[in-house]
Image (cartoon, grey):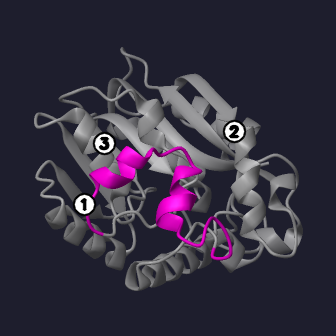
Amino acid sequence: MTDASAPHEDGDSLDAAERRRAVRERYADIATESSAACCDDGCSDDPAVGGTTSRGYAADDLAAVDGDANLGLGCGNPTAIAGLEPGETVLDLGSGGGFDCFLAAREVGADGRVIGVDMTPAMVEKARENRAANDATTVEFRLGEIEHLPVADASVDVILSNCVINLSAEKARVFREAYRVLRPGGRLAISDVVQTAELPADLRADPDSIAACVGGAATIESLESMLEAAGFTGISIEPKADSATFIREWDDDRDLSEYLVAATIEAEKPPSAPSSGRQPTSNADTNR
């Protein structure tokens, strides 16, 4: 078991329990207010439109989903890179209001299934309301932590996530859990922010910065190491240079694009793999 009071993988003094508390409180507020962007000061005057299209969604995507599922929280469009097929089972880590889940449901069709997992009760409640608004009978939402997924072994074909794994204090555990629940031959299709230069210490230790998709970002090298240690192959992490446009809007006092970039993260569970991955090495549990 992980000691919740232990320092998190980034190595500063903010422990895992503090991080979870900060993230849960922030996203509970967002769910209640029904307005947000990944960072409060950025994205667009209308994050549900301008901010979302700048991150890779088409106007048709926005029009396809009813209710207030689109909270403008992402940093990419994981469904666009997932190559979803009819009949597949999809899991969304940190599903928020359910926007990516409803887009995935369109792709996998009536014979497919989509599961969203979020640790914030208010978000799960909002997502379930949006499920009703969209008559999305193949989508379900579960309360749970992405480090301890409420999902059976080897039961999922594709895992999506959108600007969420950076929030976790235990990224290596997230990838081990992802490996566990994927069927052999299953795949990851993730949009997230990654660290390109050492973040200032005040950002890494600030609960608000961590909860705003900034302070907890990992380097590409450490993410590759964690994915490999979990058992994944075919690992690809591709930065998106155009993401600087919206990342610059995340802080009024400094240019965060000097430290962060949005990226697509893809990997596969080998077709002949067992349900559980290799045990990570000590190097795989760090973000630097």
Q: CA distance from mark 3 to mark 1?
A: 13 Å
91 horizontally vs 195: left or right? left
* Residue 275 point in image, percent of width and height: 34, 31
Going from the N terminus, do you reach mark 1 or mark 2 first? 1
User: Foreground residue, 109 or 214?
Assistant: 109
Secondary structure found at label 2: loop
Give the residue number, with chain letter if any, for mark 1.
Answer: 141
40 horizontally vs 87: left or right? right
Residues at marks 1 and 2 touching, judged by CB atoms closer than 8 Å: no
Residues at marks 3 and 1 touching, judged by CB atoms closer than 8 Å: no
* Residue 125 point in image, percent of width and height: 26, 75
Q: Amino acid at mark 3?
A: Ala
User: Foreground residue, 162 or 135?
Assistant: 135
Residue range highlighted in magenta: 40-67
Secondary structure found at label 1: strand
Crowding at dot 3, Cα within 10 Å, few <14 / some 14-19 / many 20+, comes out as: many
Viewer-nearest of labels 1 and 2? 2
Going from the N terminus, do you reach mark 3 or mark 2 first? 3
Q: Amino acid at mark 2?
A: Lys
Residue at the image point whose x is 33% and y is 69% from the top: 68
The answer to whether residue 149 shows anywhere in this view is: no
Give the residue number, with chain letter if any, for mark 2.
Answer: 240
